[in-house]
Image (cartoon, rainbow, N blue to C red):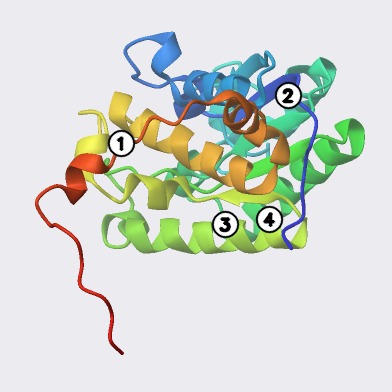
Amino acid sequence: MRLDRSNRPFHTLVTLGDSITAGGTATRRDLCWASLLTNQIGAAQQAPLRLVNSGLGGDVISPRSVGGPVSHSHGYPTALERCEKHVIAYHPDLVIVAYGVNDIDYGTPLHIFLDDLETLITTISDRTGALIVLLDAYFTNWTWPDMPPFLAHGRREVALGYNRAIEELSWRLDCLYASVWAAMGEAPWVVDTDGVHPNNLGHQLIANRVFEVLAQNCSVLARKAQADRETFVQWRDESAMKEGFGPWPADDR
């Protein structure tokens, strides 16, 4: 039998990640995946859910990331450096962590990324006790003129290697895992014209995938379905499907 990760309503969701988590190029705040997901959860559990969207454009996993000095030069902290203020301080009971895209593009070695992602996850878990959902790297199709050779000829393979490692880490740390790369299906039409951020359709696919994983693991999200079943009135009328066939002969077997 599947383990039930939560039978009580969630009260505070924190989403931690980069510009895609923050909303990217979604055309309205309520169309970014974090907002869509919050609405889905709130409706399913029949209880309001507070969203704290801690997505930050250009964010990388830690100061050890190749992109760490770039973030610092723009005055931005990395995930590990802002975890206390942007996650733990809100006392969440549900946290979604989404990193990989920027570290892939900066060329952060996978072992450094994984070590620091593990530190981030264990810190949040130990300090909050929240249920954590770990996302893999989003699908992007961005290219640029001076793209380094390891990306120019194999970015997809690098990203998939990151994603396999993120999934393995989620199992080892007993987190839930949602493959947003798979949800996007590598379809270029779910990515904005900038090649990086999901468009409105892409955000919907991401929200749906995360909700699917939560629904499969948290019985609280069946509350509305269960309540509706207790009061519903049968709406199916299949009589028209039987018309014109007449009585069936007796089965002589």
Q: Which of marks 2 and 4 is in front?
A: 4
Residue on which the image places disc 4 = 170
Find disc 2 in the rendering and name its residue.
82
Provide the secondary structure element on which disc 2 rests. helix
The span from disc 2 to disc 1 (Cα, nearest Å) is 57 Å
Q: Please identify the quarter of the rendering in which residue 109 is found.
A: bottom right
What secondary structure is found at the residue carrying circle 3?
A: loop
Three-letter residue code for mark 3: Pro
Crowding at dot 2, Cα within 10 Å, few <14 / some 14-19 / many 20+, comes out as some
Task: Reply above or below: 239 against 160.
Answer: above
Tell me which amino acid carries mark 2: Arg
Q: Earlier in the sequence, mark 1 or mark 3?
A: 3
Say what secondary structure mark 1 lies in.
loop
Q: Do the residues labelled 4 and 1 touch (CB within 8 Å)?
A: no
**N-term-proximal mark, 3 vs 4:** 3
Q: Earlier in the sequence, mark 2 or mark 4?
A: 2
Q: Where is residue 133 in the image (x, y as percent from the top left)?
A: 66, 42
| Coordinates of residue 129 in the picture (x, y in percent) | 87, 36
Q: Give the image quarter of residue 189.
A: top left
Tell me what residue is drawn at x 78 percent, y 39 percent: 6
- Disc 1 crowd rating (10 Å Cα; few below 14, some 14-19, many 20+) is few
Screen quadrant of the N terminus: bottom right
Mark 3 or mark 2: name the one nearer the start of the chain.
2
Q: Can residue 100 be seen in this view?
A: yes
Q: In this view, does 70 lie to the left or right of 214?
A: left
- Residue 4 image position (x, y, % from top left): 77, 48
Amino acid carrying mark 4 in the image: Ser
Q: Which labelled disc corresponds to residue 193?
A: none
Quickly name the residue at label 3.
109
CA–CA distance in space, label 3 to label 4: 19 Å
- Disc 4: CA contacts within 10 A as few (<14), some (14-19) or many (>=20): many
Query: Which residue is disc 1 drawn over?
Result: 237
